[in-house]
Amino acid sequence: MTQDRKALRVQGATKAYETGSGQVHALQDVDLTVEQGEFISVVGPSGCGKTTLLWSIAGLHQLSSGEISLGPDKIRKPHHAIGMMFQLANLLPWRTIQQNIEFPFEIRRKTPDRKKIAALLERVGLGGFGAKMPKELSGGMQQRASIVRALASDPEVLLMDEPFGALDAFTRDEMNLLMEEIWEETRKTIMLITHSIQEAVFLSNKVYVMSARPGRMHRVFEVPFERPRNLKLMETKAFFDLVNEIKAEIQHQPSSASAAVAAE
C-alpha cells in the first residue's frame, strides 16, 4: 500500500444521547478501518447504532469519545472528501434536477463542473432529465439523481444510509447493479448501511455485523465472490449460504431492548 492512500479509521467510537427519558447509549468502543477503494456494508439488529455511526463518520454527529479520521484528517464536522446519500433522495421540490445536483456547490460557494455532471447523468440513465422537476421522476430516478449529486463533487468516500430501502424489489436490484458498476469504474471508498443482507453481500468486499445497542463491531464476514458481479450471483448456493450465515449471526443476538435491560 502506498503512503498516499487514505484509510477511513474509526477508533473507540462511543456515543450517548441525553433524552427526556434518560440517556441512550448508541455506540460503545467501535473500531473500524476501511481501506481506500473498499466497499463495505454494515448490518445489525434494529436500533444497534448503524446510522449513528454513519452520521458520525459524515461529521454530522459528535462522538462522546473516540476518534474518526480520513488519512491524516480528523473528522469532527462535514468534510469535503466525504459524500453522503440518505434514505430518501431529499430533492428540493422547487428546484430542477440540475439545480438540486448543483445545490451543494452553491452552499460551498464552488463552481460546479457541469461537464462532469452531464456525464454522470448520462451514466445513471438520466441524460436529458436535468431540466425536470423531482415530481416528474419516479422514486428510482430520484435516487439516481441523488447518486449524481453525491458523486458530482468527486468525494473520496461515499457514505450510504439505506438509500434503496423505499424502492420496489425490481428497482432495488437495478440500483444495486448500478452501484456495483459505478464502484468498478471509480473504486471509491464506500460504506453502506442496510437492512438487506442480500444487498450487503452483493455489493461489498466485507460485511460488518454490529451487536445490539450499545452498538459494537461484533463480527466481520469477507465476501469471496469475484468482480464484476451480476444479478445471477444472487441465485447461487454460495451466495444463499453466506446470506443465511450472516442472518443467523444477527438473529442470535439479543434485541437492543433486551441488551439494555441486561446491562442495567
Image: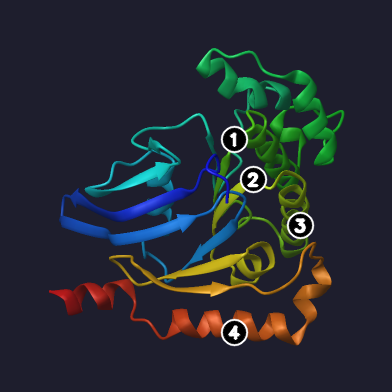
The label shown at residue 171 is 3
Residue 84: give x, y in percent of width and height. Answer: 54, 41
Proximity of marks 2 and 1: CB atoms separated by less than 8 Å: yes
- SS class of the residue under badge 4? helix
User: Which residue carries the number 4 mark?
Assistant: 244
The residue under the point 82% across, 36% down is 126
Mark closer to the chain start, 3 or 4: 3
Q: CA distance from mark 1 to mark 4?
A: 33 Å
Q: CA distance from mark 3 to mark 4?
A: 23 Å
Q: CA distance from mark 2 to mark 1?
A: 8 Å
Q: Identify residue type, mark 4.
A: Asn
Residue 161 position (above or below residue 41): above
Q: Identify residue type, mark 3.
A: Thr
Residue 103: give x, y in percent of width and height. Answer: 59, 21
Q: Nearer the viewer, residue 236 or 145?
A: 236
The residue under the point 45% across, 32% down is 79
Disc 3 or disc 1, which is closer to the eye?
1
Mark closer to the chain start, 3 or 2: 3
Q: Identify residue type, mark 2.
A: Lys
Mark closer to the chain start, 1 or 4: 1
User: Which residue carries the number 1 mark?
Assistant: 155
**In the rendered image, which quarter is residue 229 located in?**
bottom right
Residue 224 position (above or below residue 110): below
